[in-house]
Amino acid sequence: MTPRFDDIQVGDAIPPYTSLPITRTQLVRYAGASGDFNPLHHDETFARAIGLETVIAHGMFIMGIAGEAVTAWIDNKCLRRFSTHFLSMTQPVDLHDVEKTQARATITVTGKVVAKYEENGEKRIRCEILAQDGQGSRKLTGFFVAALP
Amino acid sequence: MADKSKLGFEFPPYSIRVEQNKIAEFAAAVAQKDDTDSIREIYRDVEAAKAAGFENIPVPPTFPTSFVFWTGGGLLGTVKGVGADVSKLLHSEEDYEFFAPICAGDVITRNMKVVDMYDRGRKERKGWFVQVTVLETEITNQRGELVMRARTTFMERE
């Protein structure tokens, strides 16, 4: 249930959302679903050729996870704006060394309400969001605007 | 490096029917699900979508990224279209404005153009110089309504 405008205060936290550890298989699934077949996200040989240790997640996959976090709290239909800056690369979990690598591949999205206002005849909130991995490395920051009942 | 003569370049318009299964596959991908049975109801059940106020199954917020790469040589062709080198490219920002829902069955048309190209940093400082390209994409539906606008910023390292 989308929260009601009158029940929201500036400074309220949005419910945190934590992803599963991102696997290479999920990167392939995301590539197929989105059409973003940049080899950087699935081809280890390409990643190494351009100087990376391994493949990295699509920035848009991390934004997609952030979108899940946002729409777990407010209805998809209420969203008016969704904007992110990508800050760092995300390496997937290594399945032969899950224990050491799952934190870098697990994304937690947090955020808080920073403004309440009326615009276009709607009651809107603006929330800042942050996605970071289990080691505290910041993956993206951004904001969304939602119209609430 | 990015070809600055491409500032103002408009990619050929592209139309696509928004398919229900495609929505489900995308929803499964971003929710890290192994099947489409376990995604949220509004992304797989028309009645649930209608109960939530949509005309049909809606798309997840970042789904419109999937309107970009299925044409014009895919991602690599699109990147080459602005003269950039994919091996030096970083996606730095994505900004969506939503004006109306996009739902299964809609036929959307995507108009994408290069709206900004500029340098950032100083060439003489290695690793501190990037070329920035900004694409703006407007998406209209079969009724001619503007349903969303996306601004995509990427940086190309030297």
Image (cartoon, coloured by chain):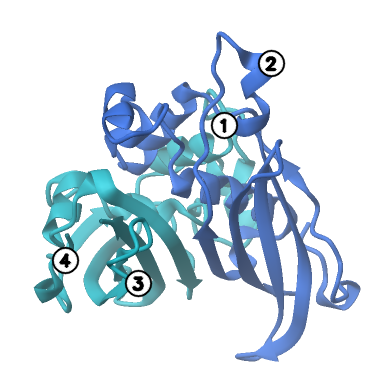
Chain colours: A blue, B cyan
Residue type at numbered disc 2: Glu
- For the N terminus of chain A, the image quarter is bottom right
Whole-angstrom CA distance, mark 2 to mark 4, is 47 Å
Determine the chain carrying the residue at label 4. Answer: B
Question: Tag 1, which secondary structure?
Answer: loop
Hey, what amino acid is under mark 4? Pro
Q: Where residue A43 is drawn, which disc sits there?
A: none
**Which callout, 1 or 2, points to the residue nearer the camera?**
2
Evaluate whether label 1 is on the same chain as label 2: no
Residue sitting nearer the eye, A78 or B136: B136
In the image, A60: left or right of B85? right
Q: Distance between the residues labelled 2 and 3?
A: 39 Å
Alpha-carbon neighbours of circle 3 within 10 Å: few (<14), some, or many (≥20)? few
Residues under labels 1 and 2: Cα distance? 19 Å
- Find disc 4 in the rendering and name its residue: B13
The residue labelled by disc 3 is B120
**Residue sitting farthest toward the top:** A96
Q: Are marks 2 and 3 in contact (CB under 8 Å)?
A: no
In this view, the mark in front (2 or 4): 2
Q: Where is residue B55 in the image (x, y as percent from the top left)?
A: 50, 60
